[in-house]
Amino acid sequence: MVKSSLVFFFLTMSSFLVATEFGLIFGGGIAQAYGSEDQIPDDFNIKVKFYPVIKAGLLAEYPITPQFSLVQEVLYSQKGSNQNITVDGQPVKFKLKYEMDYLEVPFLLKYNLLKINKLPIDSLVGISFSYLLNAYYNLNGTINIVDDVIVVDDSYKIKNLDEFDYSLLYGLSTNLKEYGIPVSIEYRISLSWYKIQMPTFEGIDPVNVSNQSQTLAISYKFWN
């Protein structure tokens, strides 16, 4: 899997040399980890919250027909999750946050579905692979013992985490080309099928979770 990812990354970077359209892309959105509820101890109550993220990078587009094109990107992409945790019968409240930074390489098929006035509505479908740059674990909360409150604060950089992640991508986009503005706007969902083993608490086994995110982005074509 790692070797195939490296080959795919090399081919993607090489193909940028023959692209006909280039641009910058920047956006933000929300991320959330998901996994099987069977991994959660019976007395734990976990509410998963959205984690704000950004992405930014370069894109290259290859028009095949007036309705169909290929898009490749190289992005700095954030992923992660927020969780509020309580334990039945225990005076504890925790907030657990995973923060992950990736170098992400999406490969997308863009197809024009229709036009509304002058605005084209395009579908986006594809896959991406991501290489982990950094990962952080942040746990904070309180433990109430009679009249005392113990504050828990534990943060560290996660080591030996899976380096690669793999995702399905889909969404919609439009552009303002007909108005003389070289800008596109898109909404994209990223859904990973790869399980990442994340640390939880001392004495409790790690959990296998996958990344997902929803982002809204703007891209600017500076060469076409």
Image: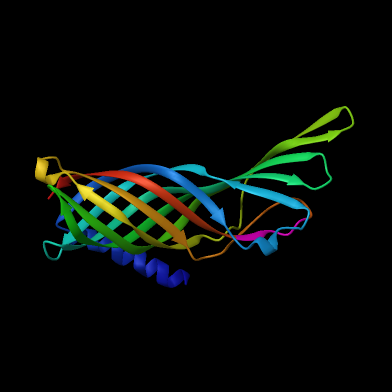
Residue 118 falls left or right of residue 126? left
Please say whether residue 100 is visible from this viewpoint.
Answer: no
Q: Nearer the viewer, residue 18 or 200?
A: 200
Percent position (x, y) of residue 193?
49, 66
- Report the front residue among 155 and 146: 146
Which is the main secondary structure of the residues drawn in magenta?
loop
Q: How many marks?
A: 0
7 left or right of 182 in image: right
Q: Position of residue 9 (x, y in %)?
A: 35, 63
Q: Nearer the viewer, residue 218 or 156?
A: 218
Residue at position x 74%, y 39% from top?
A: 93
- Specify the segment rendered in magenta: 204-208
What residue is drawn where x is 47% and y is 72%? 1
Seen as rendered, the residue at the extreme top is: 147
- Residue 206: say if magenta: yes
At which x and y percent is residue 91? 82, 39
Q: Going by the picture, which residue comes out furthest to the front?
A: 116
Judge left or right: residue 85 versus residue 145: left
Residue at x 29% of width, y 54% of height: 172
Up/down of 24 relative to 130, above or below: above
- Residue 205 in view, yes or no: yes
Relative placement, left or right, of 46 versus 214 is right
